């Protein structure tokens, strides 16, 4: 397997495993097959799994947490927050507030069964919330040791500049 360095010192397999389809969107889920796929991915050298709290909702992080609990492998896990869904509902809203980031992170940590998320990123930007406030909340999670790295999905160059500042 080839590896890539994302950002500063975050080395991951060149191929990552997006786990969304293991919970919904592409047909019925089968946790036994999904667990076999996760194990096979590790056997193939894939050490980077991508999930989100809204996949399922919550099911996908629970699934990855079950895998982490039973496996000696320690893949890097990226998870996302910001698209808010309730179990049993498909409707969605966006929340990038620092308070919601903290609440979402605590839930993700519990479901994944880890003390720190390797990469925690904003799934979708809410244009009505200041990215500076979001980044301040995420920075506090880094300082608290809850997340190792921050990421943003689908952002404009201007939003990225503001977030970085």
Image (cartoon, helix red, strand yellow):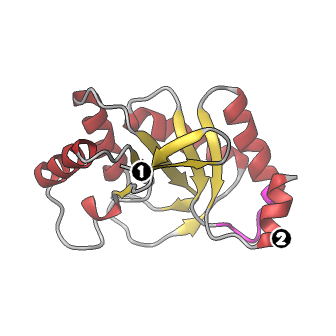
Q: Is residue 128 magenta?
A: yes
In the image, what residue occupies the spot 61% across and 35% down?
A: 148
Q: Is residue 12 above or below residue 17?
A: above
Left-right relation of 24 to 116: left
Q: Is residue 23 magenta?
A: no
**Are circles 1 and 2 on residues that touch, CB within 8 Å?**
no
Which of the numbered marks, if any, corresponds to residue 23? none
Q: The residue tagged with tag 1: helix, strand or loop?
A: loop
**Towards the viewer: 52 or 17:** 17
Query: Residue at label 2?
Result: 158
Left-right relation of 141 to 10: right
In the rendered image, which quarter is residue 21 located in? Answer: bottom left
Of the numbered discs 1 and 2, the one sitting upstream in the chain is 1
Q: Residue 77, percent across and down?
A: 44, 43
* Extent of the magenta region: 125-131
In the image, what residue occupies the spot 74% across and 34% down?
A: 140
Q: Is residue 126 above or below residue 86?
A: below
**Towards the viewer: 73 or 126:** 73
Q: Residue 153, percent across and down?
A: 61, 64
The CA span between labels 1 and 2 is 32 Å
**Towards the viewer: 7 or 32:** 7
SS majority, magenta: loop
At label 2, counting other C-alpha atoms closer than 10 Å, the crowd grade (few under 14, some 14-19, many 20 or more) is: few
Q: Residue 42, percent across and down?
A: 27, 43
Q: Residue 15, percent across and down?
A: 39, 57
Q: Is residue 133 above or below residue 21?
A: above
Q: The residue tagged with tag 2: helix, strand or loop?
A: helix
In the image, what residue occupies the spot 56% across and 68% down?
A: 93
At label 1, counting other C-alpha atoms closer than 10 Å, the crowd grade (few under 14, some 14-19, many 20 or more) is: few
In the image, what residue occupies the spot 41% across and 53% down?
A: 51
Query: Residue at label 1?
Result: 2
Name the front one of labels 1 and 2: 1
């Amino acid at each position: 397997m080839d590896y890539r360095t994302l950002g500063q010192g975050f080395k991951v397999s060149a191929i990552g495993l997006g786990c969304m389809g293991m919970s919904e969107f592409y047909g019925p889920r089968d946790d036994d097959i999904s667990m076999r796929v996760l194990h096979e991915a590790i056997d193939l050298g894939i050490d980077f799994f991508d999930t989100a709290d809204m996949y399922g909702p919550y099911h996908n992080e629970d699934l990855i947490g079950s895998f982490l609990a039973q496996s000696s492998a320690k893949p890097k896990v990226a998870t996302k927050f910001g698209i808010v869904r309730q179990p049993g509902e498909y409707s969605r809203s966006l929340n990038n507030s620092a308070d919601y980031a903290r609440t979402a992170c605590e839930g993700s940590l519990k479901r994944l069964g880890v003390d720190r998320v390797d990469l925690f990123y904003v799934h979708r930007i809410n244009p009505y919330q200041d990215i500076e406030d979001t980044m301040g909340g995420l920075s506090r999670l880094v300082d608290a040791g809850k997340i190792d790295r921050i990421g943003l999905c689908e952002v404009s160059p201007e939003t990225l500049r503001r977030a970085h500042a």
